[in-house]
Amino acid sequence: MTEPKSASDKAAGNLSETAKTELIRTYSDFKYGRYVDIKSKYTEKGKAVEETSITMVSVILDCEFEKNTERKTDGWISGEIDCVGNVGGIRTVVDTKSSWDMVTFLSAISGSLNSDYVAQMKGYCQLWETQQAIVAYCLTSCPQHLLEAEKYKLLKSMNVISEESPEYQLAALSLEHNLTFDEIPLEERVFLFYVQRDDEWMQRVRGKVEKGRDWLRDFEKRHLAGKAYAV
């Protein structure tokens, strides 16, 4: 849904370069089974603590959420929510974002919600037929296996004899303190962004999807022809 930079492309409803890049990733994945698998300690933590984050949100909202295991599609968009429940009598989908540390948590909640997440939540509202969605930023302690991996990297980066060295022991304690937060009150470790259903926006999504499909058809013709079009 990112708009192109030039006014003429925007007026014409053309796709942005960002959208084209994503379409090429899709083409590579679906046509050839080659895709970019982006993994990081941040995404790994998010998956590892998802249940904990959902529990934290449940306590804050005094609501029992139903964990979702289904991926839905309507022919235009697809998605897989974390959970769904009734918040204040309103059926609501929830997506948790587990921050790596205190600074990333506070930075995430310092302004407005990331536009990509807004789009994600509006799509979820459409797929699960709800009137609202919540993005819940949660500050959870680092899982032990990731914490040990961080300590190992710390050890390798220091000029010490072994993990018994006082310098490393002190640094490791500091690292663990910065990545564990259980002593902080729960209400200070959860921040909620509410996103409302937007049917008009979904109409624009469908238009963009059609544009993307047309672009991919032309792209495949160009690819299979083995040469660039005349300019």
Image: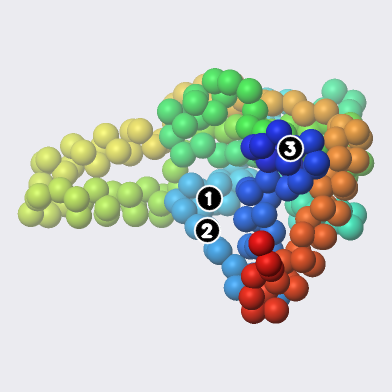
Q: Residue at x 27, y 53 (%)?
A: 153
x and y, in percent, of residue 182 in the image: 46, 31
Residue 196 seen from this side: yes
Instruction: Say which element carries label 3.
Output: helix
Q: Label 1, secondary structure: give it.
A: helix
Residue at horizontal 68 percent and vertical 46 percent from the top: 16
Task: Tell me the CA gap for discs 2 and 3.
Answer: 34 Å
Q: CA distance from mark 1 to mark 3?
A: 37 Å
Q: Which residue is mark 2?
A: 38
Residue 77 location in percent, x, y?
Answer: 82, 52
Is residue 55 visible from the viewing direction of this image?
no
In the rendered image, the residue lying farthest to the front is 231
Evaluate if marks 1 and 3 touch, with contact meaning CB atoms under 8 Å apart.
no
Which quadrant would the N terminus be assigned to in this image?
top right
Real-space CA distance between mark 2 and mark 1, rounded to the nearest whole angstrom? 9 Å
Could you tell which of marks 2 and 3 lies nearer the N-terminus?
A: 3
Counting residues from the start of the chain, the first of labels 2 and 1 encountered is 2
Mark carried by residue 8:
3
Left or right of 92 in this view: 134:
left
The image quadrant that residue 186 belongs to is: top right
Amino acid marked by disc 2? Ile
Label at residue 43: 1
Q: Amino acid at mark 1?
A: Thr
Residue closest to the eye, 86 or 204: 204
**Quarter of the image that includes the C terminus:** bottom right
Dots 2, 3 in contact, CB < 8 A: no
Q: Are marks 2 and 1 in contact (CB under 8 Å)?
A: yes
